[in-house]
Amino acid sequence: MASLRINVPRVTSSVLLLAGSILLAPSLYGQAVNSCLDCHSALDGPLQVTPEKFSQDIHAQKGLTCVSCHGGDASSYDPDQSMSRKAGWKGKIDRRQIPQLCGSCHSNPAYMRTYNPSLRTDQLDQYHTSMHGKRLAAGDTKVAVCTDCHSVHDLRPPSDPRSTVNPVNVAQTCSRCHSDAAYMKPYGIPTNQFASYSVSVHHEAMVVRGDLSAPTCTTCHGNHGAAPPGVDKVQNVCANCHAFQAQMYGKSSHFKAFQEKGLPGCVVCHSNHGIRMPSDAMLGTGHAGVCMKCHAPGDKCDLARSAILGNLTLLDGAIKDADQSLRLAESSGMEVSEARLAQDQARDSLTKARVTIHTFQTSLVDADIQAGMKIAAANLKAGQDAMVERNHRRIGLGICLVAIAFMLVGLWLYIKKLES
Amino acid sequence: MIAALIRWLDERLDLEGLIAPFKHKTVPRHRLTYWYFFGGITLFLFMIQVLTGILLLLYYRPGANEAYESVQYIVTRVQFGWLIRSIHAWAANLMIFTAFVHMFSVVFLKAYRKPRELTWVTGMILLFLVMGFGFSGYLLPWNTLAFFATKVGTEMAGQVPIVGKGMMIFLRGGPEVTGATLTRFFGFHVAVLPGIVTVLIAIHLFFVQRQGMSVPPKVEAEWTANPAARREMKFFPNFALRELMAWYVAMGVLGALAAFFPWNLGVKADPFISAPAGIKPEWYFLFMFQTLKLIPSKVWFVDGEVLGILGCSLAGLLWMLLPFFERDKAARTKVWVTGISIFALVYVIGMTVYGFLAN
C-alpha cells in the first residue's frame, strides 16, 4: 500500500500563493479595469486614446484617470452605466468649458499644493484677461484654450523637452494657429511672426545655443494671458531683460520723440519678431542702417551718428590690432597673458559703448570709447614690446652661439695640438 | 699668483695626489667612443638643473594660490627669469632624453655586463628618479595641464593592488590633488630627489672611475685579433676636453630652444573645471600611457589598467636586472638580450610616436 506522504514545501507554497492572490486581487482588479481606455484604444480618429499615450500624461502619472475630467464610471463595461449622466459622465468637453474644467483643479491652491506646491494657480484668471480668454467669453471658439497649447491625454510638464510648452517648442506651438493664414484670416493679424522669429537672434540663442532663458513668444506676450509685471504694452517688454538699454533710452531724446509720434520704442530700430544680432552697421547708411530712415543726411543727428560709428569702428579696429599683436607674440612663445586678460576689459568698453548708444549722447559714448582705446593701446604696446624682447633674445642667442662656436673650434684645435 | 695659490694648496692638501688617478686614467678610443659622451651630457644637464633650480627658488612660491602667479612673475618681471625658467624646463626634458640615449647606448654596447652590473643598476635607478624629477616638477607651475596630468598620474599609482590607495594618498597629501599635493611635490622636487640623486650620481661615477670605460665586445674581439689596433686616450685632458665640447653643444642647443621656444606657462589650474579633451602626459611617459590605453578594460578577470601598471612595473624591474640574465660565453643569451633590447627601443619610440599622433 502506498504510503500517504505530505510534501510540506509544496503545500506551504500553495497556501502562500492562494493567500497572496486573495490579498492582491482587489488592487489588481482596480488597476486593470478602465473601460474608457479599453474601448477608446480600439477607436479610430480623435476618439482614440491608447493606454501608451495616456501613460505619458502627467495627470495619469499623478494618479488621475479619465473619470477625473470626463466623469462616468470606468469600472463598468456597460456603456449605459459607464457613460451614464447619473454617474456624472460629461462626454466630450465643450471647448468653452475647458478653461473652467482645468481651472477647477489648477485654480485651487489647496488641491494643487498636494501635487506641486510651486505651481501657480492663477492661470485661469490670467486667461480671462488674455485676448484668447476674452474672445472665448464672447463666443469665439476658434481661439486657443488650455488643451490647444498643452495638448490633451498626453500632456507633459513644461520641463519635459517633448512638451508642446517646453521653451524650445513654444514658438512652434503658437505657430500652429498664428502661421495659418486661412485660420487667422478673420482676425486680420499678420501670420509671419514665426517665420520672422525663426531667423532672429532670440531663436538662435534658444534653439542653436540651447539657452532656455532666451525669449520665445510667451516671454514677451505672456503665456496664460497677462503681460509680464510692470509692462503696460508688449513693446516695452524688452526692458525686462535689456534693463540698461531701457534705462538709457528712457532718458534719451528719442523716448519723448517716439512717444509723441506713437512709435513703439525699441521695435522702431530693432524690429520685433525678427530681431537680428545688433551690429555697428545699424548706425551706418547702408541696407542695415536704421538712423537715416528718420533723419536727414547732414543734420545734427546724422553728424552725431557718423561720429559714434567712426569711434566704434576705431575701437573695434584697435582691439583687433592689439589681438593680432598679442597673438603674434604668443606664437613666438612670449608670455603676454596679462595683456590678453586686459583685452577683455577693452572688449567690455566696446560693449559698454554699444549699450551707451541708447542714450543717444555722443559725449557718453565717447567716454566709453576712450577708456577702451586706452586699454587697447596699452595691450598693443605690450604685444609690440614682447616682439622687441623676442628679437633681443634672438640677437643674444646669436652672439652666444657664435661664442660657443669659437670655443668649440678653439677646443678642437687645442685637442689636435695636444694629440699631434 | 694662481700658480702660487695652487702650490700653497698642494703643499697642504696634496692636490697632485688627488688628481693623479685621473691623469693615469685612459678611455678606449674606437668608432663608437662618441656614445660615451651621453652620460657626461646628462650629468652636465643635471648641474644646469641644480643651478637654474636654485635661481628659480629665489622667486618661486609653492602653494595653490601663489605658484602660478610666482612663475608668471618670474617669466615677465624678473630679469632673465624667462631664460632661467625656459632653460630649467628644456634642460629637464633634454636630461631625460640623454639619460634614455645613455641607457640604450649602454645596452647596445653591452657595457652593463660583469663587472659593471651595479653601475647599470644605479644608472637605472637614476633614470627612474630623473623621471620622478620630471613628474614632480611638472606640477609646480600649477597650470591646467600640470594639474590634470598629476591627477591622472597619481590615479594610476592608486591602481596598484594593496599599496596603491595608500601610495596615492601619500603622493597627493589627501584624496584629491590640491595645494597640499603641490607643497608635497615641491618638497620631493627640491629636497628629497636632489639629495638621493646626488648620492647615487656620486656612487655611479665612482663605479665608472673604478672600473673604467667598457669596450664593446666586437671592438674588443678586433683588438684581441689585432693588438696593434688597440687605441686609447687620456681621460684628462683629452677625453675631458671632448666632453667639454659636448657640453658646449648642449648649452647651445639649450639656449636656442629657450630663445625660440620659451616654455609655455599655460592657464592657471582650476580644480573645478573638467579635464581638457585629449590630455596626455609628458613625452617620456607617453609610451606607458599609450600602452595602458591599448589594454582592454578587462583581461580575463583582471582590471586592464591594473594589469598594465603591474606589467610596466615588472618590465622595468626585469630591465633593471638585465645584467644578471646574461651569462658569460652564452651566445644564445646574448642574441636573446639583443633581440629584447631592439624590441624595447622600437616599442618605446613607436608607442611614443603613436601616443603623439593618437587622438
Image (cartoon, coloured by chain):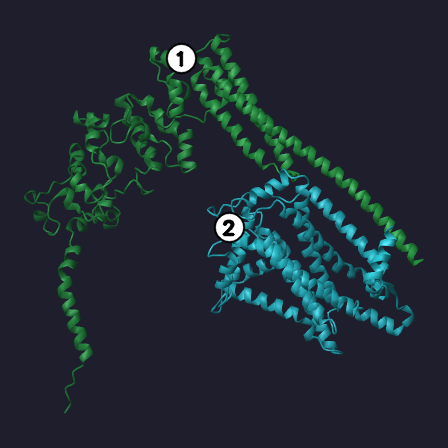
Instruction: Examine the image and state in which quarter residue B135 appears.
Output: bottom right
Q: Secondary structure at mark 1?
A: helix
Of residues A228 and B136, the one nearer the viewer is B136
Q: Residue A253: which numbered mark, if any?
A: 1
Amino acid tagged 1: Ser
Q: Is residue B119 left or right of residue A342?
A: right
Residue B30 visible in this rendered orientation of the protein: no
Q: Is residue A57 left or right of residue A367?
A: left
Q: In front: B183, or B214? A: B183
* Label 2 crowd (10 A; few <14 / some 14-19 / many >=20): some
Chain at tag 2: B
Mark 1–mark 2 distance (CA, rounded to whole Å): 56 Å
Is the C terminus of chain A in the top left, top right, bottom left or bottom right quadrant?
bottom right
- Residue A149, image x and y in percent? 26, 35
Residue at the far right: name it.
A420
Q: Amino acid type of disc 2?
A: Gly
* Residue at 46 percent of width and 19 percent of height: A357
Q: Position of residue A140 (x, y in %)?
A: 19, 26
Specify the colour of chain A.
green
Q: Nearer the viewer, mark 1 or mark 2?
A: 2
Name the outermost residue toward the left.
A86
Please give the label number shown on residue B179: 2
Colour of chain B in the image: cyan
Q: Nearer the viewer, residue A228 or A225?
A: A228
Residue at x-position 15% and y-position 51%: A35
- Give the camera-side residue of B339 and B89: B89
In this rendering, position of residue A209 left or right of residue A223: right
A10 w.r.t. A205: above or below: below
